[in-house]
């Protein structure tokens, strides 16, 4: 036992599977001991040994304002005093719904839920219910939460149905899920030619953040839209990560594409359990209690979570917010690129708004297989080198990173300097 993180990890493993309540937190891919967080403020958190880290995870995306933003803290404190949960409608839910719809023009109605998994699962059911079809398309490397039908990896060959990614998912449950390679136009065309008439929806992270950071090419995204329209399938943008993160209007705003349904999470809850899905009125009115598609939740629209989300949305909607965040994030990415180039390390990186990714390749990858061909050992050296120097990035090479409004120029410069030292050894 060297430090308190080790002690806590051992204690955690005795009572929680793997010591964590969500797998990637366990540092399984990179080895070593997860840092147990004691508290967080602004761009930093402190671990169980009171060591400070510059936080580029930000709870995997929600903390776009940084930790403990005063206006958000105040809103949450006020809400808590009025009660934690009622299981009855509130005015605040309407305010949050109105705020979301005002910023995402493709949505005419929205329903609030408690997690991204729940939102994506519900959007899928709605797409199937509204179209009366059962087949769906998803892409290898895109993650839409852990609902059975979406937990599918690619099968072999072109346009084949996938295999369950997890034990406990019977193959029958994923037999209507078609898994395609991201950015592969030929596969996309083939899949629609074969199955277009029976497809309920195509679900996509249009800027993917679950295979590090990979953009759908403009042509690929446009073709997804066109083919869905042609074949009567719904285009579902999973913007749990990108919504209010890559820009005020999400990936759909960046790409200029209007999906049928949008799935949101993370930033809209500002760090509280809150997610949502929405789209055109005619589709959303298929949901219970109006329509035949059932969906419900004891804590849905929770008053404390909605207060947190509303306060967060108010801050990010201020003029210039995303310009400043985007500039800050780009300065990180550009600084890392220059440092790597100076040390002769193959490196590429990209960002949009407050989301970024970097790769130990000369060129940006276009799909999951390329991302996963990263030299694991080198990534782990970089990860642990940064961690030792007080910089916390995702403990897996297939995750994106996040910059918040609380990250300062000094934080960015310190991060680039830490990376430079490690690049010298790679
Ligand atoms: N969709 C996307 C794009 C995500 O990134 C995530 C979570 N990282 C989810 C869905 C699932 O969200 P949650 O973890 O809140 O269930």
Image (tube, rainbow, N blue to C red):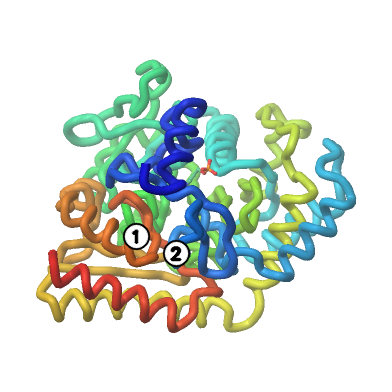
In the foreground, 237 or 424: 424
Give neighbour class at mark 1: few <14, some 14-19, many 20+ (Cα, 10 Å): some
In the foreground, 75 or 119: 75
Residue at 74 percent across and 37 percent down: it is 299
For residue 9, above or below residue 377: above
Q: Position of residue 149 (x, y in %)?
A: 44, 28
Which residue is the extreme one toward the left? 344
Residue at 49 percent across and 75 percent down: it is 407
Assess mark 1: CB under 8 A from ligand 1?
no
Badge 2 element: strand
* 357 relative position to 21: left or right: left
Residue at 68 percent across and 28 percent down: it is 294
Question: Badge 1 is on which residue?
Answer: 387
How many angstroms separate mark 1 from mark 2 (CA)? 8 Å
Task: Please say whether residue 419 is visible from this viewpoint.
Answer: yes
In the foreground, 303 or 111: 303
Q: Position of residue 257 (x, y in %)?
A: 47, 62
Which disc is residue 53 wearing?
Answer: 2
For the C terminus, the quadrant is bottom left
For residue 341, above or below residue 388: below
Assess mark 2: CB under 8 A from ligand 1?
no
Q: Earlier in the sequence, mark 1 or mark 2?
A: 2
Give neighbour class at mark 2: few <14, some 14-19, many 20+ (Cα, 10 Å): many
Quarter of the image holding residue 343? bottom left
Q: Are marks 1 and 2 in contact (CB under 8 Å)?
A: yes
Q: Position of residue 212 (x, y in %)?
A: 32, 55
Which residue is the extreme one toward the right? 82
């Amino acid at each position: 036992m060297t430090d308190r993180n080790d002690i806590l990890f051992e204690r955690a493993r005795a009572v929680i599977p793997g010591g964590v309540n969500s797998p990637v937190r366990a540092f399984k891919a990179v080895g070593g001991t997860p840092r147990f967080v004691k508290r967080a403020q602004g761009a930093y958190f402190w671990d169980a040994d009171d060591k400070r880290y510059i936080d580029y995870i930000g709870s995997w995306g929600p903390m776009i304002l940084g930790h403990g933003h005063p206006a958000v803290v105040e809103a949450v404190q006020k809400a808590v005093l009025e009660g934690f949960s009622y299981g009855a409608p509130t005015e605040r839910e309407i305010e949050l719904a109105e705020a979301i719809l005002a910023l995402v023009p493709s949505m005419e109605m929205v329903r609030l839920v408690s997690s991204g998994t729940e939102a994506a699962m519900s959007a899928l059911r709605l797409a199937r219910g509204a179209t009366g079809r059962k087949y769906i398309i998803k892409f290898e490397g895109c993650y839409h939460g852990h609902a059975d039908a979406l937990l599918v990896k690619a099968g072999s060959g072109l346009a084949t149905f996938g295999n369950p990614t997890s034990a406990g998912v019977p193959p029958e449950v994923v037999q209507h899920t078609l898994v395609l390679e991201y950015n592969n136009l030929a596969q996309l065309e083939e899949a629609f030619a074969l199955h277009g008439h029976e497809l309920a929806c195509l679900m996509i992270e249009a800027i993917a953040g679950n295979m590090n950071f990979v953009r759908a090419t403009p042509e690929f995204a446009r073709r997804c839209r066109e083919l869905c329209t042609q074949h009567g399938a719904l285009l579902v943008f999973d913007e749990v990560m990108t919504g209010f993160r890559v820009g005020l209007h999400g990936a759909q705003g960046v790409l200029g594409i209007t999906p049928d349904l949008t799935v949101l999470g993370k930033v809209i809850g500002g760090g509280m359990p809150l997610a949502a899905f929405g789209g055109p009125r005619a589709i959303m009115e298929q949901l219970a209690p109006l329509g035949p598609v059932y969906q419900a939740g004891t804590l849905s629209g929770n008053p404390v979570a909605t207060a947190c989300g509303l306060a967060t949305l108010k801050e990010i909607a201020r003029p210039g917010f995303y310009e400043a965040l985007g500039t800050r994030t780009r300065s990180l990415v550009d600084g890392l690129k220059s440092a790597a180039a100076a040390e002769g390390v193959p490196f590429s990186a990209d960002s949009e708004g407050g989301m970024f990714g970097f790769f130990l390749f000369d060129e940006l990858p276009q799909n999951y297989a390329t991302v996963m061909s990263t030299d694991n050992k080198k990534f782990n050296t970089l990860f642990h080198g940064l961690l030792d120097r007080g910089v916390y990035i995702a403990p897996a090479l297939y995750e994106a990173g996040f910059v918040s409004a609380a990250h300062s120029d000094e934080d960015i410069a310190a991060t680039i300097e830490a990376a430079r030292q490690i690049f010298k050894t790679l």
